[in-house]
Image (tube, rainbow, N blue to C red):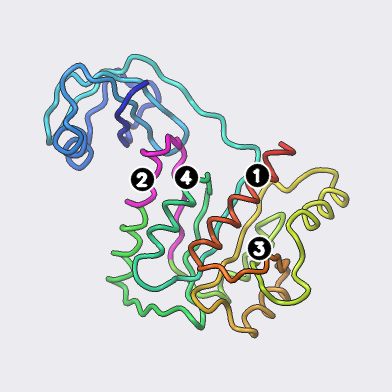
Amino acid sequence: MSDYRVYCQPGDRLPSEIILSPEEAHHLVVVNRARQGAKVVAFDGQGHEWDTELVKPDKRAARLDVRSTRTALPLPFEISLAQSLPKGSLMDSIVEKATELGVRRIFPLLSERSQVQLDADRRDRKSERWRVAALEAAKQCGNPWLPTIAPIESLPEFLRRQADFDVALVASLQPGARSLKSILADYGNRHGRMPKHAVWLIGPEGDFSPDELAAAIAAGFEAVTLGSLVLRCETAATVAVGILAHELQQTA
């Protein structure tokens, strides 16, 4: 098994060689110290992987000779994460964990209690940081699929997307929030199968306001309990995605 993974976009599904971008070449040759003859797995984030050999360890344009090609089958379900932006760099960690857990789409949201003020330039820089965080996580965990990270939008804008998903879930500590198992069981009884497209809506520090939670439920989101303890937003996102992935995998 290769110790090295690199990201590439060769433009051809069956390339004989791959020339890495300056960023990827520098990371492979300078940071990871890969040498000529090293076995390297290249991937494009869309399920395509290439087993390669490093034949030119150039830190600006390393060249890989392709030995074999494979395409990973996608999971039979897709999980999306709609995360209200937390303060600081916590979103970087959330993106990393979501990528490791196989999330296919990430929707960064601005809500009433989001402690983030972003102009156009800062939005672009944040989006690039999240893209890099997802890429590094995919390299580390071996995920051949990179999540799509949507542009930042407001919570009301996102709530209008509810119909895009088979099941829309919002984490809640409010009385009456149901267990994930019961919601999935109800869905299975109604449709004769488990959902193919599901989304988790997770609040920021301090959670969504009561009005926001009411708006989410009115839009068709199911309030789901993650237990009796108050979780930090990055913990809630990881737990929510993890238990949903586990439940859907059991029935796939």
Q: Quadrant of residue 226?
A: bottom right
Asked whether 86 falls inside the magenta stretch, the response is: no
Q: Secondary structure at mark 2?
A: helix
Q: CA distance from mark 4 to mark 1?
A: 13 Å
The C terminus - image quarter: top right
Whether pointer 4 and pointer 2 mark residues with C-beta atoms closer than 8 Å, the reply is: no
Q: Nearer the viewer, mark 3 or mark 4?
A: 3
| Structural distance between the alpha carbons of marks 1 and 2 | 23 Å
Q: Which residue is mark 2?
A: 135
Q: Amino acid at mark 2?
A: Leu
Distance CA(mark 2)–CA(mark 3): 28 Å
The percent position of residue 239, horizontal first and vertical second, equals: 58, 56
Mark 3 packing: few (<14 Cα in 10 Å), some, or many (20+)? some
Which residue appears at 74% of the width and 38% of the height?
A: 251
Disc 1 marks a residue whose amino acid type is: His
Q: Horizontal and vertical percent for residue 69?
A: 41, 19
Q: Nearer the viewer, residue 5 or 243?
A: 243
Position above or below: 8 against 172: above
Q: Which residue is mark 3?
A: 226
Residue 98 left/right relative to 156:
left
Q: Which residues are magenta?
A: 132-151
* Residue sitting farthest toward the front: 229
Q: Nearer the viewer, mark 4 or mark 2?
A: 4
Q: CA distance from mark 3 to mark 1?
A: 14 Å
Q: Which residue is mark 1?
A: 246
| x, y percent for residue 122 | 29, 71
Upstream in sequence: badge 1 or badge 2: 2
Q: Split into 4 quadrants, where in the image is the N terminus? A: top left
Residue most extreme to the top: 67
